[in-house]
Image: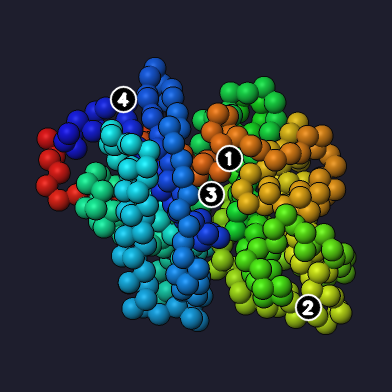
Amino acid sequence: MSLLSLLRQKERFGIGVLSGTSVDGIDVGYVHLVRRSGSLKIELLSFETYPIAPALRQRIIKNFSPDAARLPELSQLNFLIGELFAEAILTFKTAFKVEKLDFVASHGQTFWHQPEQQRIGKHKVRSTLQLGEAAVIANRVGVPVISDFRVADVAMGGEGAPLAPYLDWLLYGKQPIGRVLLNIGGIANLTALKPFADKQDLIFFDCGPGNVFLDAASQRLFGKPFDKGGNLAAQGTPARKVLTELLQDPYYRKAPPKSTGREYFSEAYLERILSLCQRNGLSNYDILATLTALTAESVAKQVRAFVLSRCAVDEMLVSGGGAENPTLMRFLREALPEIATLKKSNAVSSIPAKAKEAVLFAVLGDAFLSCQSAALTTPAILGKLTLPAGFPLS
């Protein structure tokens, strides 16, 4: 196959690969994509998650901090994450007997995301940084790689995130009910669709902390990697005084579209919360309950302000690691009594919820190869192309 023939194809087989904000594994999804009569057929053929070693996870997370990050480590991690993604893909190809593969679409690992303008001399600069060297993946796997999906949108003045609303619209945009699709990963994000929504009708934004504080507090206070089943938070009581103060954060009042990440909701931010909780005499269980309620109530506050004020919502479907936390789900239902149906999403359309983001990146890779913009607020073509050595152009 040549690059020219790949660009002309209406049917493609792609692998989407990523590591999310929680840095708990590498998701790999094998997707069949067919463009026909102006529509896109999406079929997930297989999916797997490959764990990231705890020591490496800690090293990656350490380098999210501007105070702790080191340039040599960032350079090394860029290539190492590329190797890890390539190894995961090659293992996946063998395990699932993948014979036909046209491209890989890699989101990489986000280290910094700052879509707000900051002045540097005479320039106002936005930026975003994902590591996981595409050249390593392309040459190890032997197919073209599309990567760096956020930067074109940021360069044109967009937020660069969240990216999932494009897939949400493809899968749910033609349906007759109002729906919110909430994903609670490290950072929570949502897409709201009114009945028979057009692309320009979408409401979408990052909500703020999802599991990022819950996981860190579980590790710090209980020596657990995360609050399995929400059992630790269930033994505490949220502190209303502390919650009221935390919910005054200006991010929750900022109108969408908007995006955020560990840059804002950082270790230093968590330290301030823990100090506030300790000054108010909270037990460790109460602290975790309060952080869990913060995730739920910050989502509810923004749904009420930015979604329910514009359209009726019949149901909310919740995916991501937060959907596996019954305490968080209970807090969310209590915070949003206006929404009649609020439940864990086991699947997005016919796609298992856990595979959604891997499918998303395969879809974004296909959009790039089809010269279609998957951005929602700018006309940007999302992604960059890296070819393996010797790949023919025509």
Q: State the mark number for residue 276.
A: 2
Q: Residue at x 76, y 39 (%)?
A: 342
Q: Residue at x 67, y 22 (%)?
A: 176
Q: Amino acid at mark 4?
A: Lys
Residue matched to label 3: 162
Give the distance between the C-alpha atoms of the residues marked 4 and 1, in whole angstroms: 26 Å
x, y percent for residue 383: 35, 47
Does any portion of residue 143 appear in the rendered image?
A: yes
Q: Amino acid at mark 1?
A: Ala
Question: Mark 3 or 2, which is nearer the eye?
Answer: 2
**CB under 8 Å between discs 3 and 1:** no
Give the distance between the C-alpha atoms of the residues marked 3 and 2, in whole angstroms: 30 Å
Sequence-earlier tag: 4 or 1? 4
Q: Is residue 245 left or right of residue 62?
A: right
Numbered-mark total: 4
Q: Is residue 248 left or right of residue 1?
A: right
Q: Residue at x 37, y 25 (%)?
A: 34
Secondary structure beneath dot 2 equals helix
Give the distance between the C-alpha atoms of the residues marked 2 and 4, in whole angstroms: 56 Å
Residue matched to label 4: 10
**CB under 8 Å between discs 2 and 4:** no
For disc 3, the neighbor class at 10 Å (few under 14, some 14 to 19, many from 20) is many
Secondary structure beneath dot 1 equals helix
x, y percent for residue 275: 75, 81
Considering every residue shown, the one lying at the far front of the view is 95
Give the distance between the C-alpha atoms of the residues marked 2 and 1, in whole angstroms: 35 Å
**CB under 8 Å between discs 2 and 1:** no
Q: Residue at x 65, y 63 (%)?
A: 226
